[in-house]
Structure formats: structure tokens, C-alpha cells
Amino acid sequence: MRSDFSLVDKLLLPGVGGFKDAMHHIEGISSFLVDEMLEKPTLGICLGMQILAKTGYEYGLTAGLGLIHADVKKMNVNGKVPHLGWAPLTIVHPAPIFDGITPADNFYFMHSYEVVNTESVALSRYCDHMFISAIRKGDIYGVQFHPEKSREQGLKILTNFINL
């Protein structure tokens, strides 16, 4: 399997589903994935971002990949969960994947859990709650939103990642 990964220069972790199930399905290759992510630019999308964390609490406490010092917990918000809909990003630390993104750009979110207890590169608001919508640790990026569902601005994020 390692020789197959030598052919790629970036990794993309897409995700829809639950933290515990995701970690169960990659159980046999998780240490290999971590090694690859430490060597190559990586983008985790939604659940793909969440499993980069140390721990998740969806369906019970579960160890994540541990690439970012963070936890994943159910959103604590005065509003309907899951959070489904559009929201802009407040970029708090510029990053190359946000080149060309403006405060007027909206991104599509679909999640019940959020990454907490870590530094963010972008925040978003749902009802009265600010949550982490993007993280970065070196060349490892994660976005809580779905760029593939976020029209032109989402394609810009993906293009920026490809061009890293």
C-alpha cells in the first residue's frame, strides 16, 4: 500500500458520517495515514477534519488520529442541530487555502459536532454560537464546511489546496 501513496503529492480526507464509525473503518491503516499526512499536504473535510483531532465524543469516547490537539463535541447551540445551511468565514489567521476568499463568501455546513479546544484559522457563526470552521497545523488543513457543495468559493478553496 505504501508504494501506492508514493504516487500522490496530497491527501484529501472527505467525510460524512460519525466519528466512531470513521475511526473503526480506518483502524488498520490509521498509523500509516498519520505518517503520510505528516509528509504531504492534507485537507480534511467535515468529518475528515474532525478525525484529525485527539478525541471524539460521538457515540462514545473514541480516539482520533491525534494530529491536532483538539476534541470533537456535540454543538452546544440555541438552535436546531444539525446545523444545515450557509455561513461566511471569519478568517482569524490567513492561510494559503483562503487566497481570494472574501467576508461576503458563504460556505455550506452540515454538522452536529464541532472541533473544540484548539486554535482555528477561521470561525463561523450559527445562531448565537461561534464555532471553529477551519484549522491548520503546518500543511495539515481541515474545514468543517463542504467546499464541494459551496459553489465557486468552495472550488476556490479546493483549487488553492491543489496549488499548495
Image (tube, grey):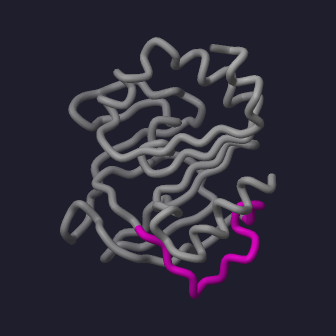
User: Which residue appears at 74% of the width and 43% of the height?
Assistant: 139
Image coords of residue 2 (percent x, y): 68, 15
What segment carries the magenta color? 94-108
Image coords of residue 99 (percent x, y): 75, 70
User: Which residue appears at 36% of the width and 69% of the height?
Assistant: 129
**Above/below status of 24 relative to 150:** above
Point out the residue furthest to the bottom here.
104
Q: Is residue 39 left or right of residue 78?
A: right
**Above/below status of 116 relative to 82:** above
User: Which residue appears at 59% of the width and 42% of the height?
Assistant: 12
Point out the residue furthest to the right here.
164
Query: 86 or 158, which lies in front?
Result: 158
User: Which residue appears at 64% of the width and 60% of the height?
Assistant: 158
Query: 137 or 20, which lies in front?
Result: 20
Image coords of residue 119 (percent x, y): 60, 51
Q: Look at the image and tell me in which quarter the N terminus lies.
A: top right
Q: Is residue 129 left or right of residue 2?
A: left
Magenta region includes residue 22: no
Magenta region includes residue 101: yes
The mark tally for this picture is 0
- Residue 63, by quadrant, is top left
Q: Is residue 71 left or right of residue 123?
A: left
Helix, strand or loop: magenta stretch: loop
